[in-house]
Image: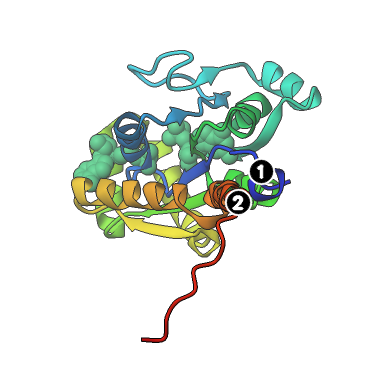
Amino acid sequence: MSAAETGKHHGILLVISSPSGAGKTTLAHKLAEQEKLEFSVSYTTRAPRQGEREGIDYKFVTEDEFSQMIKRGEFAEWAEVHGNRYGTAVHTVNRALEDGKDYLFDIDYQGGAQIRRQWPDDSVLVFILPPSMAELERRLRRRATDTPEAIERRLAMATRELEHFGEYDFLVVNDNLETALKELSSIYVAARSARRRRGHYGQALLAEARQLARPPVLLSSK
Ligand code: ADP
Ligand code: 5GP
């Protein structure tokens, strides 16, 4: 049920996706810090990269643990991306919906589609585009966190990922980082003021106004 129907304030599920290397993790972390947004920490079967911290960047689990979690129905969505599995815990989404906290999800287009299908009124989907394919490749190589084979795999996957930009509400081109962050935060701030999120304030105010029952003012025609 949507927030407008229950009269309860649900948190926004802000989904950010992009081809690998376009800069969504950089942007997502900057936005989370700037707007004091909760960051949804995913589960993954991928090995940690240098500098990644357990429970902060990801919750790193084995293939077997991940399969057990699927069986127990603990994922709101999960997908295989670049040969590894990634998933969002049901309890994270529930916390957003029940506590009214806004959450940011750095997930791929398969996860974005699953979130949209289940929570169409509570999700806002943003796709980050690189300025060009040449720049995408440069960023992946400069990041130097993956093996040359993994970089090739990520580049090969970029076309399939880009094919899904049409399923998103907003597109942000990450050319200049500051400009892209400004656009992203504007989208988030605007989403918070959407009528269906603020409808309960309007309803409460209208009820109060009616209760005050001031007689209508007769306007003179002069
Ligand atoms: P993704 O999460 O989409 O795979 P990252 O956030 O890891 O991408 O960014 C990929 C690389 O590009 C990183 O080294 C990051 O510092 C760099 N980067 C991100 N945004 C920009 C930008 N606007 N200009 C130049 N480099 C960027
Ligand atoms: P990376 O290995 O570079 O951290 O992430 C690879 C891809 O997996 C990225 O596109 C990222 O957005 C996606 N991803 C990370 N966590 C999740 C998740 O929980 N669910 C889904 N569907 N994708 C995720």
In this rendering, would 172 be left or right of 38?
A: left
Name which quarter of the figure residue 78 lies in: top right
As drawn, the label of residue 92 is none
Q: Residues within 10 Å of mark 1 (few under 14, many from 20)?
A: some
On screen, residue 190 above or below 70: below
In this rendering, would 59 be left or right of 79?
A: left
Q: Which residue is mark 1?
A: 7
Q: Residues within 10 Å of mark 2 (few under 14, many from 20)?
A: few
Name which quarter of the figure residue 43 lies in: top right
Q: Which residue is mark 2?
A: 203
**Image location (x, y in percent) of residue 19:** 42, 49
Let me know if residue 199 appears in the view.
yes
Image label count: 2
Amino acid at the residue labelled 2: Gln
- Nearest the camera: 206 or 59? 206
**Image location (x, y in percent) of residue 135:** 24, 53
Q: Which residue is at 68% across, 48% downward? A: 2
Q: Is ligand 2 less than 8 Å from the beta carbon at label 2?
A: no
In this rendering, would 140 be left or right of 122?
A: left
Spatial CA span between label 2 and label 1? 9 Å
Q: Is ligand 2 less than 8 Å from the beta carbon at label 1?
A: no
Q: Which residue is at 43% across, 44% downward? A: 154
On screen, residue 130 above or below 56: below
